[in-house]
Image (cartoon, rainbow, N blue to C red):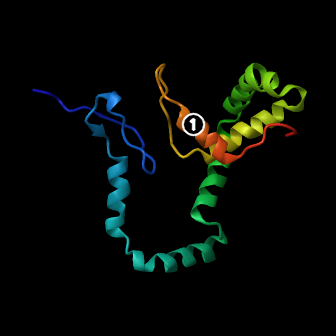
Amino acid sequence: MKIPVYVEKILTGDEKLSPKFGVDGTTGYDFLYYTTYVFIDQTNAGKLREIYEDFTGNRNNLSEMLYLRKKFYIENYYRSELDYLSGIFYNNFIKHIYGHEATLAGTREMLLEIMANFPLYRIYISKNCNLTWFSDYIRGLNIKIMNWA
């Protein structure tokens, strides 16, 4: 008798659980995401947004709000991790590629932008992992590394 195995993995957007994990599914974040809409009448979404905007004064669209909150969270709760990662990237890659035009502060800002715009909650990279999607993602952000101070 096979016992089903479920993992706690937050799936974002169109992300699918990798079959390489060898599990039967997730603990339910994706299920909760979809079942939430059972209780929301979409015909009143505009009115609800209007009430929210009047109450908070916040007129940003959802993607802008999400970006700003991610950036705030990274800068305030993961500052030391961001600084450490920036040092690693700058010392081992960026300054060797871009020379004196790149700065540590610019590298930090670049990584912050990458993280704040990142479409997934978490990724898992293995030795045989194909990262072309990640390269395409970085190019799509059109982030400049040089001359950031």
Disc 1 packing (10 Å; few <14; some 14–19; many ≥20): few
Residue 141's spot in the image, x, y percent? 67, 47
Residue 53's spot in the image, x, y percent? 61, 74
Most foreground residue, 1 or 17: 17
Residue 50 vertical placement versus 139 (above, below)? below
Residue 28's spot in the image, x, y percent? 32, 46
Identity of the residue drawn at 49% across and 29% down: 130
Residue 149's spot in the image, x, y percent? 88, 39
Horizontal relation, residue 120 to residue 99: left or right: left
Give the quarter of the image for residue 132: top right
Which residue of the protein is positioned furthest toward the right in this rendering?
100
Local secondary structure at mark 1: helix
Amino acid type at mark 1:
Phe
Decide if residue 133 is in sight here: yes
Most foreground residue, 76 or 116: 116
Give the quarter of the image for residue 139: top right
Decide if residue 75 is in sight here: no
Identity of the residue drawn at 82% across and 24% down: 95
Quarter of the picture holding the N terminus: top left
Identity of the residue drawn at 70% across and 40% down: 112
Most foreground residue, 43 or 100: 100
Identity of the residue drawn at 51% across and 43% down: 120
Horizontal relation, residue 7 to residue 14: left or right: left
Reading the image, the residue beneath label 1 is 134
Horizontal relation, residue 112 to residue 44: left or right: right
